Image (tube, rainbow, N blue to C red):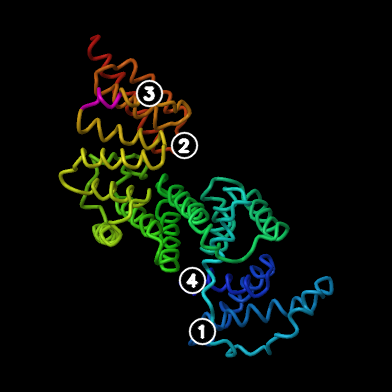
Amino acid sequence: MEQVFRDEWGRVLAVLVGYLGDFELAEESVAEAFAVAARRWSAEGTPASPVAWLVTTARNRAIDRLRRDRVLAAKLRLLEATTPATVEAEVNETEIPDERLELIFTCCHPAIAVDAQVALTLRAVAGLATDEIARAFLVPGETMKRRLTRAKTKIRDAGIPFRVPEPGRLEERLAVVLAVIYLIFNQGYSAPGQAGHLAAEAIRLGRVLAALLPGQTETLGLLALMLLHDARRDARFAGPEGQDLVLLADQDRALWDWGQIAEAREIITTIAGSRGPYLIQAAIASLHAADPIDWRQIAALYAELAELTRSPVVRLNGAIAIAEADGPGAALEIVDDLDLPGYQYWHSTRAELLRRLGRADEARAAYRDALALAGTEPERRFLLGRIAELDGAGRTRSG
């Protein structure tokens, strides 16, 4: 039942939203249908067509509610012409359209705030419970509930259409969708307690999007990128409570998921003629999994990505590759030219480069600046460890 819920919640909800034109009513009806399924399937067995059963049950629940609610009489009149009998076998699963793509684009509409786009995508498409999403994003349950309610109200009041954007706007809107999925992935990837959860949900969403938009290479690029990063998840943290961050160079490669890495590399090969930002990042991540690592090639790809995105963060990442290829001095010149005072990883990158150059006092100060901005416990522990190392080295020299 749990597997059916995870696999089919988004599809069933998408069908109901498209049928009813009412996000709130559709979600309530689908939740009721799954609740009925949990009671009945345990006694009667899973039906031959679970999606058809759920769609029919949810649709009938919605119609029953409309009939009872006289305030919504106008909607009822619109539905009367197509009101089905309450017969569970009426809908054939092969006739059910897969409208998850429409649902994804609705959840990620630019008129909705970014944090609400993320939450609504996890709730509507991935089927995560509100409290589950709240815990993942470290906010109270009531805060997340209000965030979701505002997003659904915005969809209704602004008349946000339930459809895939027209070709002229598809690329622009798709970029927003991909950014939302990658935000979900990074939220899970950044903390050990959430990594196997939200990261897995983001990869699942990436697979859905890639299947629904097979001609869009950037969807495949994002999927490959997430697979490559996630393949290293079990090696990224160590210690008794999994709270110690392990840098790439120190990770045990036997813990990497080489099956995922192979799948990602196959995806990259199939779309190698494209040069979108996610594909380039996936190619970089693939090179990080090579032995030995070709740092010059990685630096070249970062330079290409920087030209494409004009992002100072990309230039910062490129400087890390240059440090490996040409030494920390060359990289520090690039880093010091970047204006990223509020970005934790700018400070931690400077600190690492200064440490390697033997400039301990400057490195210590940069580590402390990074520590003030650190967002997770593993990162704080790592930075405190680096500061302690420098303090210890300083005491040894003075002694």
Give the vertical position of 69 relative to 389 (above or below). below
> What's the CA distance linking mark 2 and mark 4?
32 Å
Q: Which residue is mark 3?
A: 337
Q: Is residue 78 left or right of residue 45?
A: right
**Residue 85 picture location, percent across and down:** 68, 90
- Mark 4 neighbour density, 10 Å: few (under 14) some (14–19) many (20 or more): few
* Magenta-drawn stretch contains 56: no
Q: SS of the residue at dot 3?
A: loop
Q: Give the residue displayed 51% in from the left and 84% down from the top.
A: 93
> What's the CA distance linking mark 1 and mark 2?
45 Å
> What's the CA distance linking mark 3 and mark 2?
25 Å
- Give yes or no for contact between labels 3 and 1 (Cβ–Cβ under 8 Å): no
* Magenta-drawn stretch contains 330: yes
Q: Give the residue displayed 49% in from the left and 75% down from the top.
A: 1
Seen as rendered, the residue at the extreme front is 168
- The kind of residue tagged 2 is Gly
Span highlighted in magenta in the image: 327-332
- The kind of residue tagged 4 is Glu
Task: Identify the mark at residue 255; answer none if there is no mark.
Answer: none
**Residue 33 picture location, percent across and down:** 61, 76
| Front disc: 4 or 1 | 1
Q: Which residue is mark 1?
A: 93
